[in-house]
Amino acid sequence: LQDELKFAVTSAKHSFNNMASKDTNTITKKQLVTLLEESNYPATEAELAMVMKVLEENGGLIENDHDSIVEDAFKAVVVPWLSLSILDVDRNGTIDLNELKCLLWVHQDQGTPEPSEERVRKTMAALDLDFSGAIDRMEWLEYNVTCDPHSRKITPSHGTQTFFRTIDENYDSDRKVLANKLRQQVTEQGTAAVQWALDSMNSQADRDIILNVIKGIAMDVLTELDPHNRGVILLADVRNYQHQLDFKIKKLVDYSVDIAKVEVKENMINHGVVLDFQDMEHRDGGGAVAKARLRTHQSARNNK
């Protein structure tokens, strides 16, 4: 059942990504209807009206736009909607106490122990307010939707978020990135790592040297990840390469420190200044901060 739900949610996620507005990353009410129909578990008019009401009351729509459903709202709706629907074998829109146990279980990570009887009874008591002994899709959906008290925006339940993390990992493993986009990102990452050095250099020639090294790193990454020049790279391959990229960036930072030392030394010696570089190897976080402690040489001052 969990595998079936993962497949259904992954398909829905793919549909959302294809439908979503590029500017706001939202879908419309009509697109939500299409998405649920494609999942083979369509909503009735009454259910759809209740879904939109829940989203509006819990900050799931764009402000001043009651037809734009944000991604967190999509997540908050689609997992509980599909999970109950899959367990609803007779397609009457409700499940009983025994099915609720499975419903709670499929929302958890694989290998998680089955829910205790006490937890199942407490959940049923919280949901089954009319004492019918059954839970419908809207009761389960509302149970899984929360609103952040600070941002006043919709927040998927913990179970939904846990489930989606697994979905995102599996989905991303098949995603691809454009080679040119990756080259741009590596170039930006390398430039940011040594921006302090570029800003401290007076020589444009020195700055050009660093920038050319950054370009070389970006091209090396593409050569190693896209040896056949297909123009696309699996995102999983990019993530697996991250350790090697971090090493290249570290060597870039070290090289930039060396060039900065040389430039500072050449400039300052001409002014009769003695340089102490003992702190130049200190690093701050992911970037690097090179500090040259300068003290005026007494004899140089006397000569002046």
Image: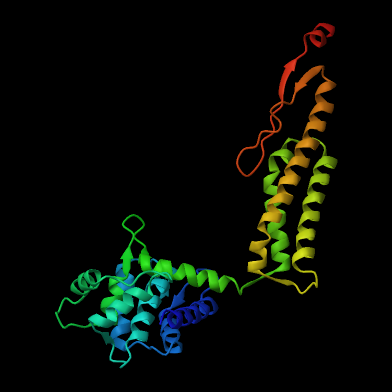
Image coordinates for residue 164, horizontal then vertical, percent: 45, 70
| Closest to the observer, 263 or 115 | 115
Quarter of the image with the N terminus is bottom left
Judged left or right of residue 265, residue 107 is left
| Closest to the observer, 113 or 290 | 113
Judged left or right of residue 232, residue 25 is left
As drawn, 116 above or below 183:
below
As drawn, 202 above or below 2:
above
Total residue callouts: 0
Judged left or right of residue 233, residue 125 is left
| Closest to the observer, 263 or 287 | 287
- Residue 153 image-quadrant placement: bottom left
Image coordinates for residue 159, horizontal then vertical, percent: 37, 68
Residue at (37% x, 85% y) in the render: 86
Quarter of the image with the C terminus is top right
Image coordinates for residue 77, horizontal then vertical, percent: 37, 75
**In this rendering, does residue 44 appear at all?**
yes
